[in-house]
Each structure stands twice: as structure tokens, then as C-alpha cells.
Image (spheres, grey):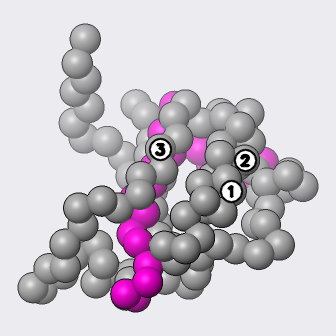
Amino acid sequence: MSYVDGFVIPVPTAKKEAFRKMAADMAPIFLKYGALHIMECWGDDVPDGKVTSFPMAVKVAEDETVVFSWIVWPSKEVRDAGMAKVMADPAGGPPETMPFDGKRTIFGGFQPIVDIRAD
């Protein structure tokens, strides 16, 4: 069964294009090492919650937007090997200037338990 890496990222709204470019530049590297699908989603309707929410989880500032991202891999084994290759690839390292605060990023690996798709 597939495996998913998920991310919630606080990105300065003014750096939207820099973030989009970084993500678009990195996508082929992930695909090269086995990823099947990469999705980067700019927050459009992401309300604050009363107890918790995406904005609260990453301590989003007034001038930031929440990005929700995921990478689908064929399996956890392919993901583990692929991520190691991405990190070892000179093109796969972080850019000189990161367009977001990585310390407030939430990420994790997930095993799908329901995967239903339209035909």
C-alpha cells in the first residue's frame, strides 16, 4: 500500500512565489527517487479554531499563510530510500534562503487506511 508524507507549513504571504518556485524545483527530484505524486496547497479558507487549527498548530503570523502539502510514495520502504537519496542529492538540499520558517513546520509519515478515488 502507498505511504504519504504530510506537511503543514507557515509561509510568509509575500514569499508565495519563492515558495512555489522552490516546491516546483524540488518536485522532479522527489519524483526521480520514487515519489508518485506531490501536492502543495496554498491556504485559501483556513480559519482559526477555538481549541486547535492549522494556523494555531504552526503559530501562523498575521503576514503568513498556511501551506498544506503531501507526497505520495508507493510504500514506506520506497519513501525511506527515496528520502535518503533526495537528501544526498546536491540538488535536493535546502535553498540558500528558505522562504519559510522550517522550525514551525509540522511533518510526518502516514499509512493510508482508506484510499477511495473517482474512476
**In-front residue for pair 51/16:** 16
**In-front residue for pair 33/65:** 65
- Which residue is drawn at the image coordinates 77% and 75% (left, top)? 97
> Is the C-beta separation of discs 3 and 2 under 8 Å?
no
Is 67 positioned to the left or the right of 31 in the image? left
State the residue lying farthest toward the right: 90
- Which residue is drawn at the image coordinates 74% and 33% (left, top)? 32
Amino acid at pointer 2: Asp
> Is the C-beta separation of discs 2 and 1 under 8 Å?
yes
User: What x and y, as percent, mark residue 56?
Assistant: 28, 84
In the rendered structure, which disc, 3 or 1, sits on the residue that comes first in sequence? 1
Indicate the secondary structure of the residue bearing disc 2: helix
Q: Looking at the rendered structure, which numbered label has been put on residue 25?
A: 2
- Magenta-colored stretch includes residue 101: no
User: What x and y, as percent, mark residue 35?
Assistant: 60, 36
The residue stretch that appears in magenta: 61-85
In the rendered structure, which disc, 3 or 2, sits on the residue that comes first in sequence? 2
- The answer for how far apart the CA atoms under marks 2 and 1 are is 5 Å
Which residue is the site of mark 3?
Answer: 39
- The answer for how far apart the CA atoms under marks 3 and 1 are is 13 Å
Which residue is the site of mark 1?
Answer: 22
User: What x and y, as percent, mark residue 114?
Assistant: 22, 36
Amino acid at pointer 3: Met
Indicate the secondary structure of the residue bearing disc 3: strand
Indicate the secondary structure of the residue bearing disc 1: helix
- Which residue is drawn at the image coordinates 59% and 44% (left, top)? 79
Depth check, mark 3 against mark 1: the one in front is: 1
Q: Which quadrant, please, contains the N terminus?
A: top left
Decide: few, some or many residues near mark 1? Use Cα within 10 Å; few <14, some 14-19, many ≥20: some
Is 55 positioned to the left or the right of 92 in the image? left
- The answer for how far apart the CA atoms under marks 3 and 2 are is 13 Å
